[in-house]
Amino acid sequence: MKYLDLKAVNAPYVHAADEVLQSGWYLRGERTRRFEQHYADYIGTRHCVGCGNGLDALTLILRAYKEMGVLNDDDEVIVPANTYIASILAVTENRLEPVLVEPDIDTLQMDDTLVEQAITRRTKAVMIVHLYGRCAYTDRIGDLCRSYGLKLIEDNAQAHGCLYAQTRRHTGSLGHAAAHSFYPTKNLGAFGDAGAVTTDDDELAALMRAMGNYGSARHYVFDHLGRNSRIDELQAAILDAKLPNLDAANRHRKELAAIYMNKVEHPDITIPRCDRDSVYHIFPVLCPRRDELRSYLQEHGVETEVHYPIPPHRQRCYDCWNNRSLPVTERIHREELSLPCNPAMTTDEAELVAELLNNFPR
């Protein structure tokens, strides 16, 4: 059993790629405009600005805020310690200072009780990451951002279609701006790299669109030091074809997840708490014998993944943090194992995985 069979997931959408190839128009065309409008409508924001990938989306948000004078070099951005490294790379690339906040071990999301004590006079933004397809936003975080005048930035790379339970609003519309990745493995995945930013801020959207086009809003006129980061027509067409089926695919993920949550009972396997609006991009379990469990499942024909084996603060590229102690984050990265949970998988296969987990030797 594959962890994710992309060939099966993508087979119904190959026609969209063929249509673009036959059109002879591959960048900044009608398909891009159509997808941006449809995705903005879906998320619930005024603007969607396509870009090259999820890291670029995060980087462009911060870069645009610097261009607007909202952020300046060495300002602090609060980020979760338990995240994929792209969240932090975007901060340091913009010469800003990440402030790492530990997660809640029960939810694996940033612990909102620790955020306020991390705020200093240099803090200008909070970046929440909807990791694993779970909503990281809380009323406490929103209230703190309003009280301290902080920008709230969402990393929505793993949570397409996720809702915030209290308001029934999609993640990606809860803060001032949100970054989205459409990497092929995502719930809404392209056939290659692609990303987008959603926001209600007219000035921010216009600036990001220019900055992702070499800094140009008018042909051959460059008002900003920009970069080349644009979604292409091929990816936009594929994403637009997939978007109407996103909610149905997420419902299937929830069915598979429910099997795991209801059937798995093993003293060494912990399923972190999750609300009903998660879209289960990743289904994580914690196990002190993670490597043994992974080998056991592999021996029985079940592929798994680890998200992620080394936390950001222990990576060589951030060697200044290597001696920092973040015990909750370190436990997650030491024990986390991702079970298969995707639209190409059947409920019978999920039942089989649950049975194998229950039979894992004690």
Image (cartoon, rainbow, N blue to C red):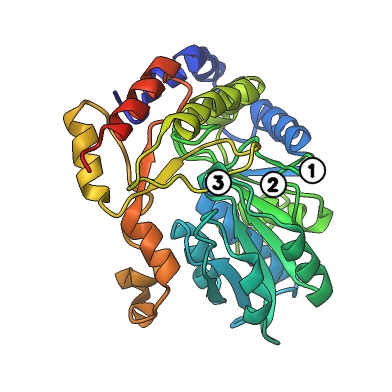
Taking 199 as reference, is 310 left or right?
A: left
Circle 1/circle 2 CB separation < 8 Å: yes
State the residue position of label 1. 45
Most foreground residue, 231 or 144? 144
State the residue position of label 3. 157
Can you say which quadrant of the picture contains the N terminus? top left
Residue drawn at x 58%, y 35% is: 279
Most foreground residue, 361 or 157? 361
Marks 1/2: CA–CA distance:
8 Å
Circle 2/circle 3 CB separation < 8 Å: no
Marks 3/1: CA–CA distance:
16 Å
Q: Secondary structure at mark 1?
A: loop
Q: Which mark is residue 172?
A: 2
Which tag, 3 or 1, sits closer to the chain's start? 1
Above or below, comparing residue 335 to residue 323 in the picture: above
Count residues near mark 1 (Cα–Cα under 10 Å), then give few for <14, some for 14-19, many for 20+.
some
The three-letter code of the residue at mark 2 reads Gly
The three-letter code of the residue at mark 3 reads Ala
Which tag, 1 or 2, sits closer to the chain's start? 1
Most foreground residue, 31 or 12? 12
Q: Residue furthest bottom?
A: 121
